[in-house]
Amino acid sequence: MIDNLKSVLQPGGRRSAAVQPHVDFARHWGFDISPCNVARGNEKGRVENGVGYAKKNFLNGQNFLDFSAVNPAAELWLATINVRIHGETHQRPVDLFRQEQTALRPLNVMPYDIGRCKSQRASSQFRVELDSNHYSVPSMPASG
């Protein structure tokens, strides 16, 4: 589930389709893009509630000196909370995960290639344009 982002979705309709680069990315990693309807923030509450829960119950009051300390603390916190009975499902998340784990598929072993090849001449200011952005290039290759 994603927010209704203009950078990801084509304009129009209640349920807009994703633009092609995002469709390719999702297909490569094996997931579906499911956008929320416009002006329906309640549709993404389940995802955002998890973020809020982690902020209030894990990060609140923590003072990590560096990022490497976050993972061990998070693993300990998850080991503690995942064995508690969940208020909505009335089951332990660790047990639910074991049931769902058999349905999980492995990730694609090939990395997603975001590279593109494009030939173009540099401007007189030694710049090339890509996706409305201008990038400077060294003067030697640009003049040759």
Image: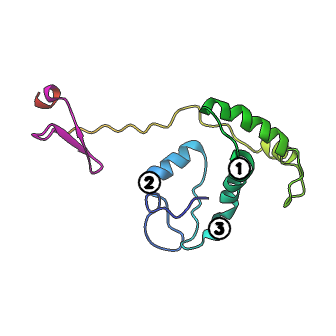
Mark 1 to mark 3 CA distance (whole Å)? 19 Å
Residue position marked by numbered label 2 in the rendering: 20
Picture layout, residue 121 above or below residue 21: above
Is any atom of residue 102 visible in this view?
Answer: no
In the picture, the disc for residue 54 is 1
Residue marked by disc 3: 43
Q: State how the image is colored.
A: rainbow
Q: Which tag is nearer the camera, tag 1 or tag 3? A: 1
Q: Any mark on residue 25, and which?
A: none
Magenta span: 121-140
Image spot of residue 141 (x, y percent)? 16, 27
Residue 42 percent coordinates (x, y): 65, 70
Label 1 close to label 3 by CB (< 8 Å) = no
Identify the amino acid type marked 2: Gln
- Counting other residues with Cα less than 10 Å from the Cα at mark 3, is it few (<14), some (14-19), or many (20 or more)? some
Q: Above or below — where is 112 with respect to 133?
A: above
Q: If the image is split into quadrants, where does the C terminus sit?
A: top left
Q: Which of disc 2 and disc 3 is earlier in sequence?
A: 2
Instruction: Specify few, some or many for label 1: CA neighbours under 10 Å numbering under 14, 14-19, or 20 or more.
Output: some
Q: Quadrant of residue 79?
A: top right
Residue 136 within the segment the image draws in magenta: yes
State left or right for residue 55 relative to residue 144: right
Choose the circle earlier in sequence order: 1 or 3. Answer: 3
Distance (Cα) linking label 3 and label 2 = 24 Å
Name the secondary structure under disc 2.
helix
Location of the N terminus by quadrant is: bottom right
Examine the structure image and report whether residue 110 is included in the region drawn in magenta: no
Q: Amino acid at mark 3?
A: Glu
Label 1: element kind: helix
